[in-house]
Image (spheres, rainbow, N blue to C red):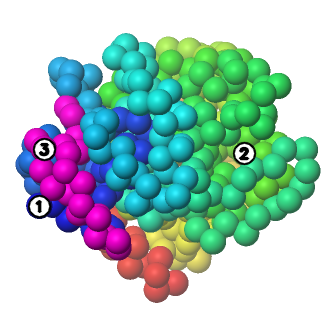
Amino acid sequence: MVTVKAGSHTYQLLQLIAIAGEFPASSLHLLGKERVIKELIHRLEVVQDIRFPPDKSVLRTKMFTVSGYRDMRTVRLSRGALPLLESLHPEASTYYLRTTRNHQLSGGVHHVGRNHRVGEAIAMAMMAGFEHRPYALPKLQRGVIARKAFPRPSFYIARDIKGSEFDDMDKTMFTRMVGALFYPGGCYAVYNTRNAVMKWSGTGEIKAQIFLSSLNRCNANPSDVNAALLLGNSPAVALQTVLESDKTKNLRNSSRFDKTYQCVHFVPLNSDGIQLLQILTLPDWNEKILNAVFESGERPKGYGSFEYDAIINGRYVLSHLDSDLARLIRFREGVRYETETRPGTKFGVVCFPWQEEFLRIYMDGLVGFRVISMEKLRNAISST
């Protein structure tokens, strides 16, 4: 007999699939130790007694099915396990059946890939401690200012944002975005490129940004949405993204990833990314980071000729602890110009260990590096 307890791996996976419809087998590491979770799923692929507190009811069935190959390998609920959804939340079963067309999931590459990208984004939000259950989130308003006090960061799936309440919307505006993350002080558009360079739909993303800004003003904050989170499997994806942008020299080209959003924060799909999400959703997180790594006398007063965060012994230093790729591009452009016009000027970058390799390649020997661990930064932020 298997007992499904709140907070357990089984409970988390059941809740994820109840929202996303399915989850990629290649991303089980987001939920904890991959080997342990794979063994758990294998055990739950066979018929057995499953007990779900608090009513301690017992259901004899198999819980999960696994199918597909390589990147398409996917974990889904068995039809016999659907009654378990009622124990998650009174509306969990209704939501699942509506979004999966009554448990009729497509095996097409496009549909499975989209569900996987959404599922990974939900998993990141869940493991970061954010509210991610669609049936437990405040209903978003449009056209009426009814700002809500989000007690914690809240992740909304794109398909729910463009649901029946907003039927007049142009559906092309959500061709890439997987969701939106509201937090005290702001809102992020959320994209998940997995292991490929994001193919931006210029006009569509601009429409999505405008609409999301409208939602943000009505429901959360009076400001526009000018920042996005770009989820990806590894820092190699971040490197590919900025290098691809270099091929498009025209800064006004809508196909550039930094055209729509002033800030695009790369978040790896792993434990480092989960911790980064927790930092990027703190109130005034940017000032907290800069105050934690720089002395007050090192911070510049006013604006310079290019983007940097501190001047230390004559060296112009950028903090990439926010993992902002758009700002990194602008910094490198400034460094190249300053190097040509003011030979001998020195530059530096503060980064996490997982960022260092791709930054060294991208900055091409133009800067020095100071590496700081995530644990050290979090401790410094908590003490400021």
- Residue sitting nearer the eye, 328 or 336: 328
Three-letter code for the amino acid on which mark 3 is drawn:
Val
Q: How many marks?
A: 3
- State the image quarter where residue 151 is shown: bottom right
**Does residue 123 show up?**
no
The reply, left or right, for residue 197 in relation to residue 214 is left
Q: Magenta region's main secondary structure?
A: strand
**Nearest to N terminus: mark 2 or mark 1:** 1
**Of discs 2 and 3, which sits in the foreground?**
3
Three-letter code for the amino acid on which mark 1 is drawn:
Met
Three-letter code for the amino acid on which mark 2 is drawn:
Val
Q: Which mark is residue 319?
A: none
Q: Residue at x 28, y 70 (%)?
A: 56
Q: Residues within 10 Å of mark 3 (few under 14, many from 20)?
A: some
View extreme (right): residue: 144
Q: Alpha-carbon distance for marks 2 and 1?
A: 48 Å
- Looking at the image, residue 52 lies above or below residue 176: below
Q: Residue at x 20, y 25 (%)?
A: 67
- Magenta range: 46-66
- Looking at the image, residue 244 lies above or below residue 4: above
Residue linked to disc 3 = 47
Q: Residues within 10 Å of mark 1 (few under 14, many from 20)?
A: few
**Nearest to N terminus: mark 1 or mark 3:** 1
Disc 2 is placed on an element classified as: loop
Q: Residues within 10 Å of mark 2 (few under 14, many from 20)?
A: many
Q: Alpha-carbon distance for marks 2 and 3?
A: 48 Å
**Of discs 2 and 1, which sits in the foreground?**
1
Residue linked to disc 1 = 1
Q: Looking at the figure, which quarter contains the N terminus?
A: bottom left
